[in-house]
Image (spheres, coloured by chain):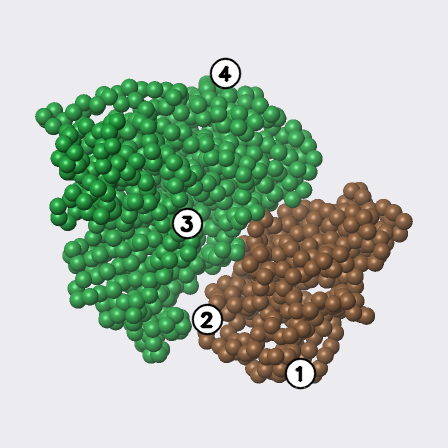
Chain colours: A brown, B green
Amino acid sequence: MKNFDWITPATSAEAVQSAAQAGRAFMGGGTDLLPLMKSGLREPTGVVSVARIPGMDRIELTVGGFSIGAGVTLATLCTHADVQRSLPAVADAARLAATPLVRNRATVGGNLCQRPRCWYFRHADYNCSKKGGEVCYAIEGENKFHAIFDNTTCNIVHPSNLAPAFWVHDGVIHVLGAKGERSIKLEDFWVRPEEDIRTEIALEAGELITAVSCRPLGSKSGSAFEEVNEKQSYDWGLVACAVRLSLDGDKAADARIVIGAVAPVPLRREAAEAVLNGKVPNEATAWAAADAAIAGATPLRDNAYKVTMLRACVKNAILAAAARARKS
Amino acid sequence: MSTEDRKVKLVLGFAGDRQEVELTIPDEEPTPWDLDTKFSVVGGKHARVDALAKVTGKAKYTHDINLPGMLFGGFARCPHAAAEIVSIDTADALLVPGVKAAIPMTQDRVRFAGQPVCALAATTRQALAAGIAKVNAKYTVLPHAARTDLALKDSAPVVHRNQQSNKSGTGAPRNGEAVAAALQQSAKVVRATATTQVQTHACFETHSTVAQWEGDKLTLWTSTQATFGVRSQVADALRIPEANITVISDFMGGGFGSKFGAGYFTPIAARLAKECGAPVKIALNRREEHTDTGNRPDSIQEMALGVTTDGKLGPYSVTITGTPGIGRGAGARNPMIYDFPRDVRAVEQVEVATNAGPQAAMRAPGHPQGSFALETIMDLAAEAIGMDPLEFRTRNDSNSVRLAQYADGAKRIGWEQRRKNGSATGRFRRGLGVASATWGGLGGPQAEVDCKIFRDGSVQVRNGAQDIGTGTKTVLGVVVAEELGLPLEKIAVSMGNTSDPTGPASGGSTTAPSLAPAARQAAYLAGRELKQLAAKHLGVSADKLVMKAGRISTPGSQGMTFEEACRLIQSGEISARGKRRSNFRTFKDGVAGVQFAEVEVDCEYGLVRVVRIVALQDAGIIINRLQAENQVNGGVIQGLAYALMEERVMDRQLGHQMNADFEMYKVPGTKDMPEIECVLYDIANGGNNTSVCGIGEPTCIPTASAIAGAIHNAIGARVLSLPMTADKVLAALAAREKGR
């Protein structure tokens, strides 16, 4: 790791100002930035610490919905009573991430901005296409953990497990930059490799996430997040799925299904939502929706199992969300 | 028999199998403990003597050693899996501020990605990293084969020069045809190919050395399993007298077989320190630890087994293929257990060179991989003849300890409730499995221990070998406390400095059984001198005195306290040296273990949760029950990791290890832990005066095999490849569905 300046601004405006200088990076909990710096993938000359900025760790109900400060830690998120009640998928996702130690440090903003875990991307001796090289090594290489959708150009999977959960709750990302504030809907936050292979998200240089706002559950509604890991302590998801739905009588309505860890960016599965809407959510309909969710998968040599796993994961997330909706 | 020798009668074995033996032992040797010995300290549950130092951070590991003016050493490493070195230019590196030395390694060819090509020392870690980046190495890149599957191809590049092929080995066994013929005659023949992965040692404390010169005297703090081995290897490498070298390993953070030698990094740390005139610390990083400090070889084991309809083992043939990387020695032990008829057993070992880091001995070398295959064919054979797999094992195992363990463990795991393979239904399916282990771990010479008794009543025990974290210091303390009739906290134990008496390398589970008898003899001899003084003072015969509960007395009398006796020491101290004798007759050649596993398989995700392990293990007479349980727990956890998670992944394209970290090289965490029931068998094994056997290795052998059997029982399909990750379990389930 190279030496760097340590900058601790008092406000987000100050933070954005100091990050305007070239070579600087924002840091929330540092759980991703520091490993990137250690492996030489990022070499900022200055690190702008934003997690301690007053107000950045606030969770509040506003007119626009539920506002979660970008500096809120995953530990706070998963234990916060209002989040558990109104955004259960988000609480699930935060709880299932990493370890208690990491959750105590890792922040909402950092979780959305973290770089992929692809072991070719992370390895200094592989100049893969994401790093400006010619090749996606995962196509022919060791691809057990790689993408099964939208994976012709780059085979990373997006590592954020909060993202699908925020998305099913109509998340909006609030950003502050040199040009002022702007808001980005979750669905517009992602950059596909075909658009720009060097990044995964639509932040411009020097822009800082200040908060994420979400729509809390209404009546007769439930949400859930399900993730499958090889290890139960500290592992990256093999597949993940967030579901929110409401019940109209005993039938599903307004379902939202977003899958994670299976493509370069999180994917909303509208076809699966259509299968579920208007039907009583049960094993049979959940499996049918799951079938729609996995349609079009293009697995690689070593990751076809992820398709099987994702199908069950979607089914289980639907059933969990429906169970919560019935209880609400 | 010299006049000083005496005859003693001992009872060896255990309650289920008592054996009386008569021995002649020399004067300096205490009467060996046996099955009927009543202990005060031995066999209790004692916290380690260094527990507080470890949990408070006071214990200083090699990584914690920081000397004034110390430099940081490290390596520039080759990014190619195979290459000729054209040139190594260190000029730019030496211009980096803070870089003090750069020594190219003397070689002309690099054979795995990450092989070191140049060693550097610098004032800070940053300067070191900057210097490493500036080493200008030019290579001619060569074709490589970094994986066993690729190295076995006819078109594969040959890893070693002067060789025609990557394959070498024992060649076809002489009795191969006879065994093949016998197989044809068998009532039932079962065939299977089982594969196991490369596992890295993944020590928490990476390999590390701090080297300091004072004139021509060299002190090395090093994380090692063999302080004395390091001393002689460094003396050889640097051509300096062993007498000038002191090796210190006060505390050690895991070795598992990867830290036997001085490695390349210890002599080079000394050379850098010499060249710079300052102490140098080399502490490998996590990537280096995974790629360049050893590993357990993988294996492909093709087996054919004949069995009789009444469940007796018949002819057996197995071909074992594995890679030692660029090193040597990849064999697996298969079979190493069960009563296979010797005349119809054919084993062929094939070694495959690959462009990967060299293998190193790893916890029970050859056994876990052999066990996985062997227990697989055992389970498949039992299934083929419709016999319960436990019944099948008991019919083919004549070891009396294991037979007791099978019966005991079956009750504890609830074996009678075990259902037929694959009869469970639903998403979550439970199953039970069983597997066995054998190990030597008897120890022997050379091992010497000093015991000193001081006038103030304090007692010191000293040996120069290392406590690798298994708790050897505590073992020696308990043995001496027992012999002198004192509580453990009265004994100060010092280990890990080659200025003290010699001891073994910690391998083969031999440290405790080598050192404990020497420690006991030292305490016996020192105690005998103290008894002489007490006898004179009390006016009784010394051979009537016993040392117990802090007193020295004849039975029924008050005598005197240990401290009072110590004040009779005229000058200095009583000092005695105990020497490890050769083993006398043992009850069994080694230790026996059986493990039972209960798993729950999530058939939607293919995930295996290990619910419970019952581990039954003997380790001779148990010295410290708490520590022995720790050892069993540790072995089971490492076995579980081998079963379900750990796997070195080598890229088929550029030949790097893709998961040389702790994120994608997966080791289990707290939530992955099963309930572990540890059942220790106190066996008076004899062999030495304490009856101690090693327990470090055997407990990691059968865990993965028992888990595999339990998965088989749960889902009705065999996963033939380690680690048994979700993708493989889902594939096995799918294949079973298809076959219906």
**Mark-to-mark CA distance, 3 and 1:** 50 Å
Chain hosting mark 1? A
User: Quadrant of the rendered structure where residue B278 is?
Assistant: bottom left
Who comes first in sequence, dot 3 or dot 4?
Answer: 3
Badge 1: few (under 14), some or many (20 or more) residues near its Cα, within 10 Å? some
Asked whether B48 or B366 is in front, the reply is B48
Tell me the residue that label 1 is attached to.
A178
Q: Secondary structure at mark 4?
A: loop
What's the CA distance linking mark 3 and mark 2?
26 Å
Instruction: List the single residue furthest toward the right.
Output: A249
Compared with A2, B645 (above or below) is above
Q: Is residue A173 above or below residue B597?
A: below
Residue A217 seen:
yes
- Counting residues from the start of the chain, the first of labels 1 and 2 encountered is 2
Distance of label 4 from label 2 (alpha carbons): 66 Å
**Farthest residue in the front direction?**
B558
Q: In the rendered view, does B550 fall on the left or right side of A266?
A: left
* Image quarter of residue A268: bottom right
Secondary structure category for the residue under label 2 = loop
Q: Chain for mark 4?
A: B
- Name the residue: 24% across, 21% down: B9
Chain letter for mark 2: A
Which quadrant holds the C terminus of chain B? top right
Q: Which residue is mark 4?
A: B310
**Is residue B156 in sight in this rendering?**
no
Q: Disc 3 sits on a residue from what chain? A: B
The disc placed on residue A1 is: 2
